[in-house]
Image: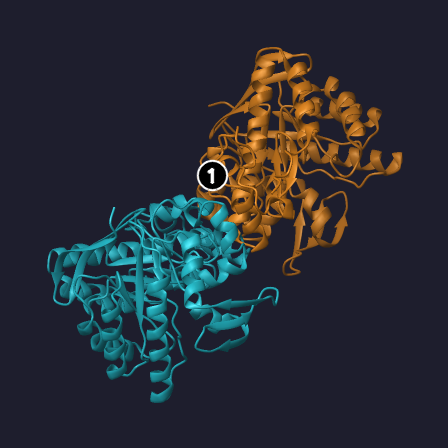
Chain colours: A cyan, B orange
Amino acid sequence: MTFSFQRLASDGMARRGRVSTAHGTIETPAFMPVGTAATVKAMTNDMVVSTGAEIILGNTYHLMLRPGAERIGKLGGLHRFMRWEKPILTDSGGFQVMSLAARRKLDEEGVTFQSHIDGSRHQLTPERSIGIQHLLDADITMQLDECIRLPASEAEMRRAMELSLRWAERSKRAFVRRDGYGLFGIVQGGTDPVLRGESARGLCGIGFDGYALGGLAVGEPQAEMFETIEATVPHLPEERPRYLMGVGRPSDLVGAVMRGIDMFDCVMPTRSGRTGQAFTPRGTVNLRNARHADDPRPLDETSDCPAARDYSRAYLHHLLKCDEILAAMLLTWNNLAFYQTLMRGMRAAIEDRRLASWAEAFHRREALGDIDAVTG
Amino acid sequence: MTFSFQRLASDGMARRGRVSTAHGTIETPAFMPVGTAATVKAMTNDMVVSTGAEIILGNTYHLMLRPGAERIGKLGGLHRFMRWEKPILTDSGGFQVMSLAARRKLDEEGVTFQSHIDGSRHQLTPERSIGIQHLLDADITMQLDECIRLPASEAEMRRAMELSLRWAERSKRAFVRRDGYGLFGIVQGGTDPVLRGESARGLCGIGFDGYALGGLAVGEPQAEMFETIEATVPHLPEERPRYLMGVGRPSDLVGAVMRGIDMFDCVMPTRSGRTGQAFTPRGTVNLRNARHADDPRPLDETSDCPAARDYSRAYLHHLLKCDEILAAMLLTWNNLAFYQTLMRGMRAAIEDRRLASWAEAFHRREALGDIDAVTG
């Protein structure tokens, strides 16, 4: 099984594709649930699979600290460790070093930092990141990059983008090619279209199995994110998958797919599930709200997910009020199912070349807001 | 469907039976997982059913406070509320008023108390307890009783036992008979065989669909509990199920079944599951212990529960270290499966009249202790 990307159909800029990997295929556009510490939080793998997810994301930063990359390697890799048999993409660890670790020091070589868990010292270089992801046995490995905070000066964006390009080269050299395993480069350059273009062309010159857009979904307005996608995608090869990292809300996904993105990951459906926020076709619902206490209706009777279809809002509200673990389980399940249904809908719409009208209907439905409260 | 108990086989004092209720049958000896607040903590119903559980227990005290008995009644009862289609037994609320509520005041009429959640005032009388359990639509309703702390004086044990008998009469009068629904009386009397006998005979005079032994599993030695069972069971009718409330450890269940008990409930498998303790045929295993960090072996390869059979101890240890919800899910699942396998084993052994040798083998295996740690 060679790592590959097939384009099956397109509709405007949007593509309907298939990524083939050592652990199976991924229909795109695809959403990857986040399995930070070798578990998609509050889910069994069967529940994740039941939603239609075909690939999950693992976090190198978390796994290298706990339980340790060498340990997972000795135990047969991340798939075997967590018993997830489908593809896994791992990030490089760089983003979370920047957002979570203490006493970070970044230089040409890499980044040294202290664990946020126990203060232990670690170094992450392009070579070490690739080595860890090899130990984890990731189907898709991400290069180490530097992700800066926005807004930033043009000089700062350029410096980080150029460093990321040099790290891309080192990542490519360190990556051990195996059948069915791929390495993705990451386009940086902040919100500057010139820098994004330079970064994309630089990466293409090195040559990767896929191209990611990094440094977005860090608080910038949606319009700015869309502009950056539009400025970047034309510089990326048609025959490689494009991955928008860390994005996002349902409407972000729809807009990004329409601009040529194939893959996504985001903690939103899982994290929201643990705080009582449910995604539905009519927007988000805060199930902690007392309006749901006597409501016998499900979150979404049209869903094929048991969590969305079979349990009353009254019950879900009750579980949340009692801080029951089942609340996190059912809401995460609902949310992941919603995201996968969204992706399935877009895949079908692209095949039929009706993505624009599908997106219009999506926005119209989402704008309706939640069903009216029950009275009485 | 009439509420009934069939004795299918016996072996010494042990009985193999079947309880028939409005929501299905329960093979006995049976263990009932505890679903305190309308959820068996950290489990989906499918996971509970997969272990072989045929009945769960709901807590009247918790449910009357949150979300409220009238609310559950309006939503169609507890089965529908939590989507558990098999039988449910509810306790009377009395035990938890005594252990959890604030500012309790007990008199002949009942007990008034303040909610441990919001300080609101409530009253629980025999009539109100039966009424709540009717609203919940419990297949098996428990009378309200007074459960005192042990050790206690003979006078105190007698007073509480006699009050419980008067409450038993009022409970019986308040209970609305419906096809497939049963009411159980509760034998009290502390550790005094004379009082236990009096209580049992008094309850039989009133007449119940089943008889429970209350006031045990409150810290007394196992031998004392067994003696109390032996002093009580001869006073109970053969043709009614016997339920030992709040018990217990696996060896408690084995000893109690051998002394004629048919039904059990206990938070141990679920609560332990949330703190990292796993039940296995070779005793309990503390998965937080670092000895498991590199252990690729499952908890129990002979189990048919995925949580016991398919995940490495290293993975379970990792999940616990990270406080992942999946740790509670998998360990609770393992523990409930272990308890149900234990009951299945006893049921088969009684049918074959080999319970004594089965129990010997059980104790021998449990005494082995956990498998040796991996070296290297």
Residue A153 quadrant: bottom left
Residue type marked 1: Met
Are there few (<14), some (14-19), or many (20+) residues within 10 Å of tag 1? some
Which residue is at a point 57% across and 21% down the rendered structure image? B345
Expressed as whole percent of the image width and height from the top left, the position of residue B356 reads 68, 15
Q: Is residue B106 left or right of residue B31?
A: right
- What residue sits 65% from the left and 34% below the top? B370
Q: Is residue B166 found left or right of A33 in the rendered image? A: right
Which residue position holds label 1?
B47
Vertical order, A243 against A54 (above or below): below
The one nearer the camera, A11 or A7, is A7
Q: Quadrant of residue B270?
A: top right
Q: Residue at x 34, y 45 (%)?
A: A50
Q: Is residue B314 visible?
A: yes
Determine if residue B111 is in view: no
Image x and y of residue A250, in percent: 30, 65
Q: Position of residue A129 (x, y in %)?
A: 43, 63
Indicate the chain on which mark 1 is placed: B
For the residue pair A198 and A35, the one nearer the viewer reads as A198
Q: Is residue A375 above or below residue B199?
A: below
Vertical order, B254 against A368 (above or below):
above
Q: Secondary structure at mark 1?
A: helix
Taking B156 as reference, is B141 left or right? left
